[in-house]
């Protein structure tokens, strides 16, 4: 079977790449191989690249996209989630730095050099909404200028079999000479799907009591929050019979004085804890055999910055429809 060539920009630890190529298991479900071959993957974060290289046969390289020149490569698809911190609703920056703003311009430059049939760009919903969508519209217009039809949609991972309420904006470009309309995958879970019930957090959290005490918040931290003013931000204790709030990149430093998700272990004893790295990875839909390199803090950052593999697997089916139709 022919394999379509793919380039992965801002590859991080490889969440999007895993979803694109498939061949993994998650929550007792198999996500079969897809006919894609990664011919280039790169990221500026060395620890994330090391994690990537632990898990994939094809190896990623440490590169700054500002200096990246892959105009000699031929690819069918380019994927990438350009860094989102300036646009995050969890830790928003009202005026993203000039260098950060330039990253979608750099992605557009590489796309223009390679001219793939299709590309997928991902970012946080804040990118879609910040300044009345100014940066989002700017990016879409730039992608149109280099010769692509643009399709976009805000997708929620909880509607695709993942126990996490994680909304991300996906921008898909189909080259103008390809007369096909991109169709985003239909939800697999929830009211608008064939499976009405969403996957619950309890599928991941089998035991509220962790094996190591280091994940518990101290009594002092709990008392401090109880005495805090009503208008202060509070960590949100998750209902394991529902879906988790967004797993972020700073869970290693999560506090009870934040809007990050935490677990209430015992109401009577007022015991709270943060998620373990393995739990966070599973909530993000990484398979259990996926290995992370570096410290726990490194793992949390890589997990929180990743594109959820299962969601990307569903997107890959829509990408394949375009490519197979073009090549037929």
Image: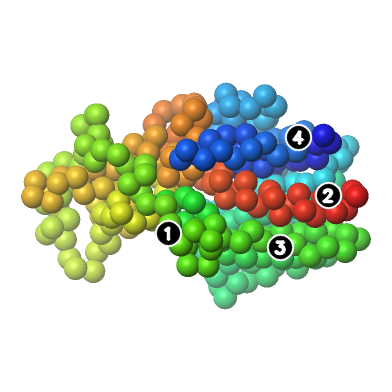
Q: CA distance from mark 1 to mark 3?
A: 23 Å
Q: Write the residue at 40% across / 41% down.
A: 280
Extreme-left residue of the structure: 268
Number of residues whose C-alpha sits closer than 10 Å to that of mark 3, classed few (under 14), some (14–19) or many (20 or more): some
**Number of other residues with Cα within 10 Å of mark 4, as a class: few under 14, some 14 to 19, many 20 or more:** some
**Foreground: disc 3 or disc 4:** 3
Mark drawn on residue 183: 3
Q: Earlier in the sequence, mark 3 or mark 4?
A: 4
Residue position for label 4:
37
Number of labelled discs?
4
Q: Earlier in the sequence, mark 1 or mark 2?
A: 1
Left or right for 286, reference 76: left
- Disc number for residue 324: 2
Residue 245, position as x, y percentages in the image: 38, 56
Against 319, is 154 above or below?
below
Q: CA distance from mark 3 to mark 4?
A: 22 Å
């Amino acid at each position: 079977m022919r394999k379509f060539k793919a380039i992965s920009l801002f590859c991080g630890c490889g969440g999007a790449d895993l979803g694109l190529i498939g061949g993994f298991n998650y929550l007792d479900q198999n996500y079969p191989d897809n006919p894609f071959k990664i011919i280039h993957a790169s990221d500026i974060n060395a620890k994330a690249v090391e994690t990537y290289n632990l898990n994939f046969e094809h190896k990623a390289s440490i590169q700054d996209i500002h200096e990246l020149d892959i105009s000699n490569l031929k690819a069918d698809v380019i994927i990438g989630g350009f860094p989102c911190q300036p646009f995050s609703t969890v830790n928003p920056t009202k005026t993203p730095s000039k260098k950060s703003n330039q990253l979608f311009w750099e992605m557009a430059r590489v796309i223009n050099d390679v001219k793939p049939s299709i590309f997928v760009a991902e970012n946080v919903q804040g990118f879609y909404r910040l300044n009345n969508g100014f940066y989002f519209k700017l990016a879409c217009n730039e992608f149109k200028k280099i010769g692509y039809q643009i399709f976009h949609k805000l997708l929620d991972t909880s509607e695709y079999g993942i126990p996490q309420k994680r909304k991300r904006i996906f921008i898909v470009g189909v080259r103008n000479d390809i007369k096909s309309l991109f169709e985003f995958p239909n939800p697999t879970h929830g009211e608008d799907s064939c499976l009405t019930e969403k996957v619950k957090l309890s599928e991941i959290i089998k035991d509220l009591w962790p094996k190591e005490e280091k994940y518990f918040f101290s009594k002092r931290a709990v008392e401090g929050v109880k005495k805090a003013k009503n208008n202060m931000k509070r960590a949100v204790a998750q209902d394991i019979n529902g879906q988790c709030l967004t797993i972020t990149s700073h869970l290693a430093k999560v506090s009870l004085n934040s809007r990050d998700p935490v677990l209430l272990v015992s109401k009577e004893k007022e015991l709270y804890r943060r998620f373990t790295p393995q739990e966070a990875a599973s909530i993000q839909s990484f398979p259990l055999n996926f290995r992370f390199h570096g410290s726990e803090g490194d793992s949390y950052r890589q997990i929180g910055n990743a594109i959820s593999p299962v969601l990307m697997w569903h997107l890959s089916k829509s990408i394949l429809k375009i490519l197979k139709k073009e090549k037929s």
